[in-house]
Image (cartoon, grey):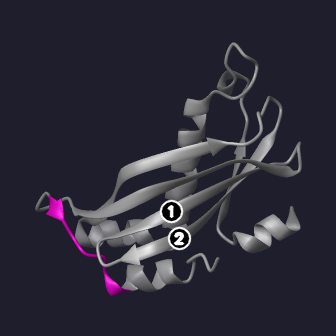
Amino acid sequence: MEKFIATYPIHTHVPVAWGDMDALQHVNNANYFRYFETARLDFFTQIDFLAELHKTGIGPVVSETNARYKRPVTYPDNLIVGVSISDIQPDRFKMHYHVYSQTQQAISTIGWANIVMFNFKTAAKANMTPELLTALTQHQQTS
């Protein structure tokens, strides 16, 4: 777990709730997208992106997302969702999610999302601020 946390300095702890499981007695696939959303917002908060959004009106929109399930997760468990960034362009970037099961001591799920910048004041695509570009670059995947 220490190696996982070192690899993903911005990470989010998510407890698995009993209600997250489905009739097949494992966490339902749709819940992982909620876990990704929680980690995404936590990441944005930690890099002060949400404060920028309130100032500029420019924020993120998910244009595409994906998940690959490697191991079933069941209640009780605590997950750690690590986030990294790649494919940074002036108006978009990709977020990667790695979900680590503390019970299994292994990565259970990986996913990604394409994030496009949007100006909510003008209802048009926008470029990132230099501050956001700098913050994202600090969490860019190297491999």
Residue drawn at (41%, 58%) of the image: 114
Please give left or right for residue 3 compared with residue 134 in the image: right
Point out residue 126 in the picture as x, y percentages from the top left corner: 21, 70
Magenta stretch, residue numbers? 124-130
Amino acid at circle 2: Ile
In this picture, residue 57 sits left or right of residue 121:
right
Looking at the rendered structure, which numbered label has been put on residue 13?
Answer: none
Q: Which residue is mark 1?
A: 95
Please identify the quarter of the rendering in which residue 53 is found.
Answer: bottom left
In the rendered image, residue 119, in percent from the top left (x then y), is placed at 20, 64
- Marks 1 and 2: in contact by CB < 8 Å? yes
Q: CA distance from mark 2 to mark 1?
A: 5 Å
Task: Return the disc, 2 or 1, that comes first in the chain's sequence.
Answer: 2
Q: Position of residue 14 (x, y in %)?
A: 69, 45
* Image quarter of the C terminus: bottom right
- Quarter occupied by the N terminus: bottom right
Image-based side of 7 in relation to 36, left or right: right
Count of numbered circles in the view: 2
Circle 1 packing at 10 Å, graded few (<14), some (14-19), many (20+), is: many
Q: In the rendered image, which residue does mark 2 sit on?
A: 85
Quadrant in the picture for residue 46 = bottom right
| Magenta stretch contains residue 126 | yes
What residue is shown at x 38% (from left), y 60% (from top)? Answer: 115
Taking the magenta stretch, the answer to whether it contains residue 71 is no
In the displayed structure image, the side of residue 99 where residue 133 appears, left or right: left
